[in-house]
Image (cartoon, rainbow, N blue to C red):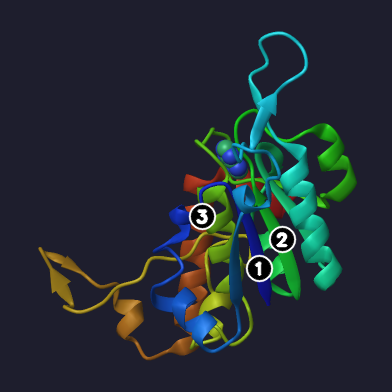
């Protein structure tokens, strides 16, 4: 899978994609991440990437020309399955969207800034608009990293133990059950005996019960969706 990220702050991406699972996914060619500097596509003398919004007191908007040229260039080189714009007014990104996107070949993610992008760009090029939560970030860079990270770990073959993605929180709509490691007794608290019973079926049953109990308590909104 190839992800092209369009940003006015490409330096922000140094680091997050260079460790652990995401690094290995790229080394094994399961994921390719290309960061593009929008500023490199400006044609104005001062390499400006913003412009005034029409109407009073509306602030700055990302300039149309460099974004349009960059998207035109990329889409002339290959077909993209989705062209995504990150914005707090997009649809809430969740595990089901991550699953859907992890099965795509090529996607573009534009990191939004200022007051956003011109509505006509949204209408012309973008197939998805995603928000990572109901709060406002300084820009879409962190959002695009969150989205790319959540997608890449789901690409088949990226996680060494394939089942570990299947048992993630949210994968079945429930939060994950608690997990325990050694020692058996820590600070007077013991590991639940069922986990030492050797009875795999009973352990699975216990895990499901715990997942349901946790979801009902911590995320009644998720539980309601499952029941509804
Ligand atoms: N840009 C600013 N805030 C954002 C958010 N919550 N999600 C996606 N992009 C954003």
Q: Quadrant of residue 87?
A: top right
Q: Could you classify mark 2 by the number of other residues whose Cα lies within 10 Å: few (under 14), some (14-19), or many (20 or more)? A: many
**Which sits in the foreground, 160 or 75?**
75
Q: Is residue 30 above or below residue 122?
A: below
Tag 1–tag 2 contact (CB < 8 Å): yes
Ranked by sequence position, the earlier of labels 1 and 2 is 1
Instruction: Indicate the secondary structure of the residue bearing disc 2.
Output: strand
- Residue holding disc 2: 108
- Residue holding disc 1: 3
Q: Distance between the Cα atoms at labels 3 and 1?
A: 14 Å
Q: Is residue 49 above or below residue 226?
A: above
Q: Could you classify mark 1 by the number of other residues whose Cα lies within 10 Å: few (under 14), some (14-19), or many (20 or more)? A: many
Q: Position of residue 31 (x, y in %)?
A: 60, 78
Q: Quadrant of residue 99?
A: bottom right
Tag 2–tag 3 contact (CB < 8 Å): no
Quadrant, the N terminus: bottom right
**Which sits in the foreground, 184 or 98?**
98
- Residue holding disc 3: 10
């Amino acid at each position: 899978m190839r992800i092209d990220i369009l940003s006015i702050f490409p330096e922000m991406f140094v680091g997050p994609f260079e460790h652990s699972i995401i690094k290995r996914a790229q080394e094994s060619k399961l994921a390719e991440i290309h960061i593009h500097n929008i500023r490199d596509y400006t044609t104005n003398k001062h390499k400006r990437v913003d412009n005034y919004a029409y109407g009073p007191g509306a602030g700055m908007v990302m300039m149309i020309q460099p974004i349009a040229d960059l998207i035109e260039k990329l889409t002339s080189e290959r077909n993209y399955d989705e062209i995504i714009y990150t914005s707090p007014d997009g649809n809430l990104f969740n595990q089901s969207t991550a699953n859907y996107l992890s099965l795509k070949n090529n996607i573009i993610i534009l990191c939004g800034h200022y007051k956003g992008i011109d509505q006509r760009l949204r209408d012309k090029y973008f197939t998805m608009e995603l928000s990572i939560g109901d709060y406002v970030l300084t820009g879409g860079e962190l959002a695009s990293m969150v989205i790319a990270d959540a997608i890449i770990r789901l690409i088949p073959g990226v996680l060494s133990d394939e089942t570990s993605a299947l048992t993630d929180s949210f994968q079945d709509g429930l939060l994950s059950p608690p997990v325990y490691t050694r020692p058996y007794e820590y600070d007077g608290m013991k590991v639940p005996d069922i986990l030492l019973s050797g009875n795999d079926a009973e352990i699975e049953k216990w895990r499901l019960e715990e997942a349901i109990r946790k979801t009902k308590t911590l995320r009644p909104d998720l539980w309601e969706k499952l029941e509804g």
